[in-house]
Image: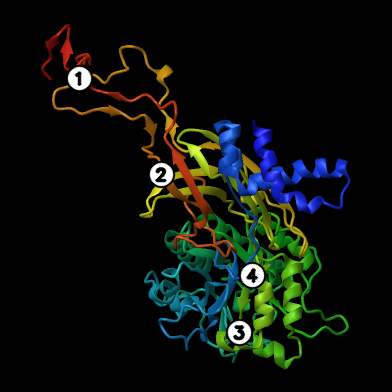
Amino acid sequence: MFWAKLDKVALLCKVIFTKQTTHMKLRFKYTITFAACCLISAPYMAGCLGSAQNTSLKSIKITPEDNKEALINPGMGWVHHYYSGRTGNYGYYLAPSDSLDWFPGASVQYMRIPWAFVEPEEGKFNWQVLDTPAQRYIEKGKKLAIRINACEHWIPYATPQWLEKKACPGVRFTVRVGPDSKGACWEPDYLSPIFLESLEKLVKALAERYDGNENVAFIDIGTFGLWGEGHTGGSSKRSREYNIEAAKKQIDIYTRHFKKTLLCISDDVDGAVSQGPFPVLDYARSKGVSLRDDSIMVNKESGKRKPWYHAELAGKYWRDMPVIVEHEHYGLSKIRGAWSGELLQKAVEAYHCSYLSIHWWPEVFYKENKEAIENINLRLGYRLNLKEFSMPSELEIGEAFTAKFEWANAGVAPMYEGAWAAITLKDSSGGIVAVLVDDTLNMKDLPVAPKGRPKSVISKKSFSVAFLNPPEWFNEYTKTMEYREGAEFYGAPTVPATKAGVYEVYISVGTRDGTPKIALPLDLPDDGKRRYKVGEITLKAPKNPGLEVKTTKESPLSTMDYINGKKVRY
């Protein structure tokens, strides 16, 4: 009977094959007709093939393209210097309402500020210099990063003067000249017990506020050396042995107090152009401290001078932890002829960096580098591409089905924290009906590949929408709910409560419990919470429903209240 009906549909396609042989007519007739039936007459065929095939013919399937939009995601992005050592650069002229939403991909505000502004009096912390600008960005879902400096050349005491008054030894200096008894600035002795004791208290206070704080992207170990970059060659000119010892002591202090939030340290701590060995950086990496290049594109490539020196060193880091790259102050780099938007893009690829600085007035930097910024946003950090998704569009409640996901990471770095895909069903009021998490694929395991050649990973997971209460779990005594005066106990047939109907289907990526966290480059409707609509599903009542356990006239008296038919008093 089925093939007779199929022949009727074949007449619609017969003209296509008039120039073919009889053999070819026959072969193509059934091939094309079957495809036509699947596309045009699925409901009609369902009646012929039976309900067992119905689910397989009705499905949601999408193969979306990357929409090329900039994304704000945790663990990656452009880092704007709100304070850049000097307290007026480069956030001073931003209005309180300006959280750089207009700068695509700007996700972190960087607070590089002298210690004196944070603890102007011993033990009295001035947190508002960090909290006020930070909250402007936090409320938009963005984050902050912090470096406390202990030595600057624009302010005499980056380390608060009360430390010197406590008899902490130090050196007066003139920047790039070195120690100078008439120098305008003062650098502490980083190995002094007085300095180390006060630093420990500062770092402890910072950690109490910021360690494990989800609003913090990273903390710099920056209380050593000029500008916090880990070198003293332009200030007190300490010996290499001194610098190594002092830097390791600070690494120990920071890692003693920061157990959760990412720490990083400047590459300059082992020499701005050094090609090794790297005793301090290796020590820091052994303690989970990541790399920050401070800075690239300082000089135009010429002779032995290069735009950067430590991309190969970054190869020791980026597979396991985020790499942060800071470019030279944009204006200074331009004046020296060292700046190139194309070169900046190459640096992102070379370092596999997750964070990249906006080291200038943001409006100017964006206006003059739009094309480079747009290109970098397609590669910076991680970028999760949903290549394909499919699942049935019609199911019974409690019926097992398989969902297929195909994902790729189009960025230069892994997604270090990890995340999982979830399917969410919602009703017409936006209520959540089902959350189904694919815990077989952690997004951190997606491979990093060369530009334009992302490697896809396919994941398949079996689910059911709701769980049917199994009758076989119950004996004759428990198939009805016990009777208790004043009680209305109930064992539901489906867990959780799920009704037949038509529901919207969303895809998201986030925590293992199905909470969305990650923005995806999809041109699909979303619910405002990073769930993306991929279709609709019809849920039908189950043919074999779960057992409903409720109180009836035949219910036994609860032994909570009755023993041998006699009521028990509490």
Secondary element type, mark 1:
loop
Dot 1 or dot 3: first in sequence order is 3
Name the front one of labels 2 and 1: 2
Dot 4 or dot 3: first in sequence order is 4
Q: Return the residue nearer the eye: 261 or 38.
A: 38
Q: Is residue 140 left or right of residue 253?
A: left
Dot 2 or dot 1: first in sequence order is 1
Residue 119 appears in which quarter of the rendering? bottom left
Q: Do the numbered discs 2 and 4 sit on residues whose CB atoms are within 8 Å?
A: no
Q: Is residue 228 left or right of residue 431?
A: right
Q: Is residue 338 left or right of residue 235?
A: right
**Which disc, if any, is residue 366?**
3
Q: Position of residue 218 (x, y in %)?
A: 55, 64
- The answer, for residue 272, to whether it is visible in the render is no
Callout 4, which amino acid? Lys
Q: Position of residue 298 (x, y in %)?
A: 73, 83
Q: Position of residue 358 (x, y in %)?
A: 60, 79
**Which disc, if any, is residue 68?**
4
**Rendered-image quadrant of the C terminus:** top left
Callout 3, which amino acid? Tyr
Callout 1, which amino acid? Tyr
Which color scheme did the rendering employ for the protein?
rainbow
Residue at 82 percent of width and 41 percent of height: 27
Up/down of 386 relative to 161, above or below: above
Q: CA distance from mark 2 to mark 4?
A: 35 Å
**Rendered-image quadrant of the N terminus:** top right
**Residue farthest to the top?**
564
Residue located beneath label 1 in the image: 483
Q: CA distance from mark 4 to mark 3?
A: 17 Å
